Image: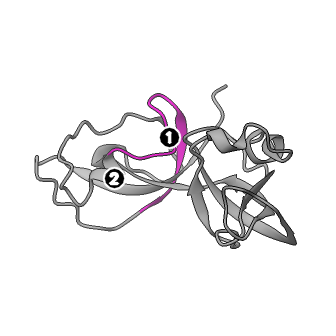
Amino acid sequence: MSKESKITLIGSKLAKTGGEFIYLGEIEECKNCKFKRLCHGNLEVGRKYKIVSVRSANHPCIVHEGGVKVVEVVLADLTIMIESKKALEGVVLNHEPITCDNFDCEYYSFCNSEGIKEGEKYKIKQVLNEKINCPFGNSLKKVIVELVENK
């Protein structure tokens, strides 16, 4: 997926350049809001976004104390765990989540990453040089990836 920017609204207290968030979808309070389309129309549920610019104007919102600001966002890079043998910078792969139900593991959130779905293509931007001690003995590497369009 491209790094094309999108315009949306976010709570003024959260509107900081470089900030990241996972879009969780519309809530009941948004149904009759005049800004609903701008807030929710451009984003995909479950995706992680990075704020690249914040506009100064503040708009009223019944959900966010202090109102909302217009922000420009792009899909954020993701840090995920993959099998060591596949961890090569520049490689494009289909996402295969690491099967793990050890919720107490320090690496759980990287093996079960939010913002990417099984089978989606991504490009490895960087392989992190970090020793991973998987409790199940899996040979894993932490990588930074960007989503790419399925063609």
Residue 60 x, y percent position in the rendering? 81, 62
Q: Residues within 10 Å of mark 1 (few under 14, many from 20)?
A: many
Q: To which residue does mark 1 refer?
A: 116
Q: Amino acid at mark 2?
A: Ser
Identified at 73% across, 42% down, the residue is 40
Identified at 38% across, 50% down, the residue is 87
Residue 63 x, y percent position in the rendering? 66, 56
Distance in Å between CA atoms under marks 2 and 1? 12 Å
Mark number displayed over residue 109: 2
In the picture provided, is 117 more to the left or to the right than 24?
left
Q: Can see residue 26?
A: no
- Which quadrant, please, contains the C terminus? top right
Q: Are marks 2 and 1 in contact (CB under 8 Å)?
A: no
Give the SS element for disc 1: loop
Q: Which residues are magenta?
A: 112-127
Q: Can see residue 114?
A: yes
Q: Is residue 115 magenta?
A: yes
* Residue 134 against residue 122 in the figure, above or below: below
Identified at 42% across, 56% down, the residue is 143
Q: Nearer the viewer, residue 6 or 34?
A: 34
- Which quadrant, please, contains the N terminus? top right
Residue 53 x, y percent position in the rendering? 79, 68
